[in-house]
Amino acid sequence: MLIKWVLAALHLLAFGFALAAVLARGRALRRLRTDDPRSFRDVFVVDNIWGVSAGILLITGAFRAFGGLEKGSFYYLHQPLFHLKMTAFVAILALELVPMFALIGWRIAFKKNQPIDTSRSRRFARISHMEAALMVIIVIAATGMARGILIS
C-alpha cells in the first residue's frame, strides 16, 4: 500500500515539475541572447529539470500501469483514455527529439566556448509550449481514468 502511495505521489509531483520546466524552457528559449552566457545556463537548467521529471514520469507511470500495483495492465490497455494519454506521450517524445539533440549540441559547444547556432531557439520554444499543451491533455485523460470514465 505504501509503495502505491509513494509512486502516485512521485508521479504527480513529476507532472508539476515537468509542466513548469517545459514552460520555463520555452520562455528561456524565447529570451535567449547569444551574448549572455547566463541565458544559456537558464535554458540548460530548466531543460535538465524537464528531462529528469520526464524520466521520473516514465518510470513511475510504467510501474503504476504494468507493475501490478494499481488497476492492472488489463484495465489500462482496454481504457480509451489510457490510449489518449499514450498518444499524447508519444507525440511529446516525437516533438522532443530535435530540441533534445540540439540542446545536447549546445551544451557541448557552450562548454568548449564555441559559437552556438541559436537560429532554431524560437522554434524550440514553440515546441516546448506544444509539449505543455499535450501534458495538459495527459492530465485530463488521467483524471478521467482515475474516475473510471469510459469513452468510446
Image (cartoon, rainbow, N blue to C red):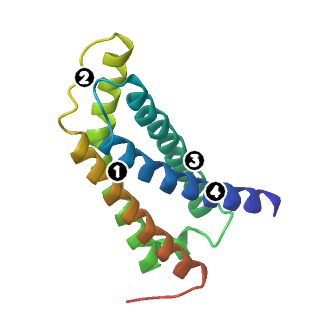
- Assign the C terminus to one quadrant of the image: bottom left
Amino acid at the residue labelled 3:
Ile
For residue 44, the mark is none
Mark 1 to mark 3 CA distance (whole Å): 14 Å
At a point 48% along the width and 40% down the height, the residue shown is 46
Q: Are marks 3 and 4 in contact (CB under 8 Å)?
A: no
Q: Are marks 4 and 2 in contact (CB under 8 Å)?
A: no
**Disc 4 to disc 2, C-alpha distance:** 33 Å
How many angstroms separate mark 2 from mark 1 (CA)? 24 Å
Q: Residue at x 33, y 37 (%)?
A: 100
Whether 111 is drawn above or below 64: the answer is above
Which one is nearer the viewer's eye here, 147 or 129? 129
According to the picture, the residue beneath numbered tag 2 turns out to be 116
Q: In the rendered image, which residue does mark 3 sit on? A: 56
- Check contact, mark 1 vs mark 3: CB within 8 A: no
Which mark is first along the chain, 4 or 3?
Answer: 4
> Horizontally, is 13 left or right of 49 in the view?
right
Q: What residue is shown with label 4?
A: 13
Q: Position of residue 85 (x, y in %)?
A: 43, 68
* Residue 3, horizontal then vertical, whole percent: 77, 56
Q: Nearer the viewer, mark 4 or mark 2?
A: 2
Give the crowd class for mark 4: few <14, some 14-19, many >=20 residues within 10 Å.
some
Badge 2, how many Cα within 10 Å: few under 14, some, many 20+?
Answer: some
Q: Secondary structure at mark 1?
A: helix
Viewer-nearest of labels 3 and 4? 4
Looking at the image, tell me whether mark 1 or mark 4 is earlier in sequence order: 4
- Residue lying at 70% horizontally and 59% vertically, measured from the top left: 9
Q: Answer few, some or many: residues within 10 Å of disc 3's Cα (few below 14, many 20 plus, some between 14 and 19).
A: many
Name the residue beneath numbered marker 1.
93
User: Which of the 4 quarters of the picture holds residue 147?
Assistant: bottom right
**Dots 2 and 3: beta carbons under 8 Å?**
no
Query: What secondary structure is marked by label 2?
Result: loop
